[in-house]
Image (cartoon, rainbow, N blue to C red):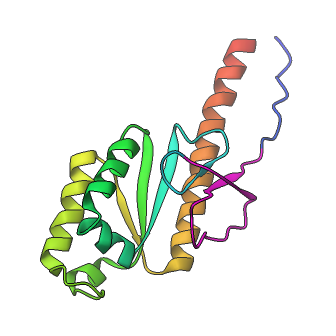
Amino acid sequence: MSNPVALPDVEITICVDSREQKPWVFSTPAVTATLSVGDYSIIGCSDWVCIERKSLSDLIMCLSQERNRFTRELQAGARIKDFLVIIEAKYSDILQGNYRSEMNSRAAWESFLALQQRYSIPFYFAENREIAAKLCESILLRWWKEHLKIYHSVLRTATG
């Protein structure tokens, strides 16, 4: 029987897109770099996991005046296996039209649902900025831990 392989502890570093104007704050180490898609990822993993941040006003703008640009972002994001959008708002904010825009609340609701389904990208609603940041960090940490388990399992199998 062979000796077990000593596996290094590999720490996660969150990557924050350099164009992010109001970046979330994390307890996990983070660095700023340019991401081709999305606003948050893990260093070295942006081809596999990426998170797009939207405030409610951003989202409404992306569903109306900037819809073509947002559609292109979602098309690019759809090529990433674990791509998602986190919105700093509640579902009820859209349903009740709790935003500064002339966009009809029903149209906004139907638009985000249509885009989510069309591109198979989940949209997560977080009640506020702090919860949204915590959700982002938790999702990235969970993704990292799950993929490290797979890596360790493959390594153990390969080394006997």
Rendered-image quadrant of the C terminus:
top right
Residue 129 picture location, percent across and down: 52, 78
**x then y, percent, for residue 137:** 60, 61
The residue positioned 22% from the left and 51% from the top of the image is: 117
The number of numbered badges drawn on the structure is 0
Horizontal side of 133 relative to 156 (left or right) equals left
The correct choice, above or below, for 54 with respect to 115 in the image is below
Residue 155: name its quadrant: top right
Residue 87 versus residue 11 in the image, above or below: below
Q: At which x and y percent is residue 139?
A: 54, 56
Q: In this orientation, does residue 160 appear?
A: no
Asked if the stretch drawn in magenta spans residue 152, the answer is no
Question: Residue, x 60% and y 39% (percent of image)?
Answer: 45
Question: Magenta segment, which residues?
Answer: 11-35
Identified at 26% across, 55% down, the residue is 68
Would residue 78 be found to the left or right of residue 45 on screen? Answer: left
Instruction: Please identify the dominant SS of the magenta region.
Output: loop
Q: Where's the N terminus, which quadrant?
A: top right
Residue 57 lies in quadrant: bottom left
Residue 131 shows up from this direction: yes
Residue 28 coordinates in the image, percent (x, y): 72, 61
